[in-house]
Amino acid sequence: MASGFLLSRRATLGSMVLGMPAGFAATALASDAAPIVQPAAATPRSFMDRAFAMRQRAVDAGDQPYGAVVVRDGRIVGEAPSRVVTGSDPTAHAEIEAIRDAARRLGTSALDGCVMYSSSRPCPMCQAAAFWARLSRYYHGAAIEDGGLPRLPGG
């Protein structure tokens, strides 16, 4: 019973993070996304460089200076700049937007085996989103600091 509750709770909270109702088919949105151009080399530096490119995209659009990418098996599967200002959405942090993008493209809210690269240290909300999306690890900042396994704030 407890494990069923946890899975149900994860699905519900996962759908909240993705910004869609529970049970909504994320695959329907995957075809709308432009393909992600992969870096020449699948290295932590190239992934962090892409996170910083997303950061610059946010700045150029007039948003807050944050960017993030989600990587699985050496390929970027989600990427996003911050859209808090441009989207008038206080939850549209770059990390959450990158998680949403990866979930849409992969057709699942369970991002097991994925790693996040973020231009800065994730806030408590983004860290919780990474936990509920089941990311395996996250790195942040130009120095590519290892943030470890995502965990709930205070936990």
Image (spheres, rainbow, N blue to C red):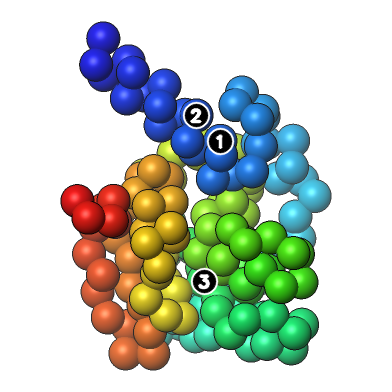
* Element assignment for label 3: strand
Which x, y percent locates residue 150? 29, 56
Q: Which residue lies furthest to the top in this view?
A: 1
Can you say which quadrant of the picture contains the N terminus?
Answer: top left
Horizontal side, residue 127 vs residue 1: left or right: right
Marks 2 & 1, CB-CB < 8 Å contact = yes
* Element assignment for label 2: helix
Horizontal side, residue 125 vs residue 77: left or right: left
The one nearer the camera, 104 or 130, is 130
For residue 40, say whether it is visible: no
Residue at image mark 1: 15
Q: In this view, does 20 lie above or below 69?
A: above
Circle 2 or circle 3, nearest the eye: 2
Q: Name the amino acid type tagged 2.
A: Thr
Q: Residues within 10 Å of mark 1 (few under 14, many from 20)?
A: many
How far apart marks 1 and 3 lie (CA) works out to 20 Å
The one nearer the camera, 104 or 12, is 12
Residue visible at 53% across and 85% down? Answer: 52
Sequence order check, earlier mark of 1 and 3: 1
Residue at image mark 3: 68
Q: Residues within 10 Å of mark 3 (few under 14, many from 20)?
A: many
For residue 26, say whether it is visible: yes
Label drawn at residue 12: 2
Question: Image quarter for residue 78?
Answer: bottom right
Residue visible at 24% across and 16% down? Answer: 2
Residue visible at 34% across and 49% down? Answer: 131
Marks 2 & 3, CB-CB < 8 Å contact = no
Question: Image quarter for residue 27?
Answer: top right
